[in-house]
Image (tube, grey):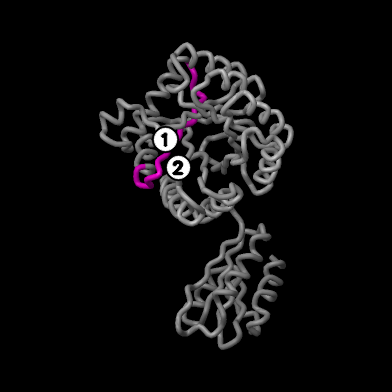
Amino acid sequence: MQKKAVRVGDCVLDGKHIYIQSMLNTRSDDIAGSVAQAKALEQAGCEILRAAIPDKEALKLIPAIKEAVKIPLVADIHFDYRLALEAVAAGIDKIRINPGNIGGMDRVRQVVAACQSKQIPIRIGVNSGSLEKDLLAKYGAPTAEALVESAMRHVKMLEDCDFTDIVISMKSSTVSTMIDAYRLAAQQCAYPLHLGVTEAGTAHMGLIKSAIGIGALLHDGIGATIRVSLTDDPIQEITAAKDILKCMGLRGGPELVACPTCGRTRIDLVQTAKEVEAALANVDKDIKVAVMGCVVNGPGEAREADIGIAGGDGCAVLFKKGEVLRKIPESEIVTELMKEIEKF
């Protein structure tokens, strides 16, 4: 099925580049705080930013944030179609709604007409916690099939208004349901899909759930944008999203491989690996770095990496492109390794 491309600001959602998205978690009436967080998220690598617009007061966020950052801004709107109309007038780049909860088709048509006039796309956001009652009765639970039927129902509402600049999300807090829903939707429509596990949890479990769900779908070639939803500072969402994309081979930057250690290890590899990981956070080179505990797997992994070390007894051997450079004392491992990385 030929994928449809949808433009959000300067971002083209066609699946060729997977965009990282996040959402402000500052109060919607805190303009200064929201602007500061928007700037921080953009600097961290956020490429599309969403903000809740629960009332007319929150509309002030749109011009303030648009003036402060260059990335597209999405208005998250529920129930009140007039907020969508005013968000369009205020210069928003995208609207996120459920067409079914903003009133009758006359209101949907008004929102569509406003978006069409400024070429603003609409994301249909379906969540397992807010499915229509008839679909819950039909399927008995918020199943993948129920999520997709809800999404397609909303898609038809927009298509009946001759509107096709549509992005779809079908999020569930159950990872397997989320995966099944997106796979099913990818078979039924060509619209860009925004991937995410909703209410995934805190930084620890939320990252695990998101990596499984988002990663599985990216491996299938599904998805145009992603959000790692964490009950934490949204900057952590950006870091996690970048790491997921890196693991899937969809983003560049340094990759660290490190062994889990065993009884043969004679250096403090755990601490060394943590220090190397922290140092690599400021490196933007596409390199693979190996930090291995001993000679059993160390030389092999180090040869496959661009650069790496294999631990000895209070020392390590430094490898570069499979060639031994020198032996270094344990206390100088990180320093010497980073010196060699700077030469790439």
Say left or right for 91 vs 179: right
Image point (73%, 32%), residue name: 67
Q: Quadrant of the C terminus?
A: bottom right
Does the stretch in magenta take in 175?
A: yes
Q: Residues within 10 Å of mark 1 (few under 14, many from 20)?
A: many
Say left or right for 132 vs 302: left
Report x, y in % for residue 304: 53, 69
Where residue 127 sits, quadrant-wise, is top left
Q: Which residue is mark 1?
A: 127
Q: Which label number is shown at residue 198? A: 2
Image point (65%, 45%), residue name: 41
Is residue 197 or residue 245 the one in the foreground? 197
Report x, y in % for residue 131: 37, 31
Is residue 182 or residue 84 the one in the foreground? 84
**Amino acid of disc 1:** Asn
Q: Earlier in the sequence, mark 2 or mark 1?
A: 1
Is residue 160 or residue 268 the one in the foreground? 268
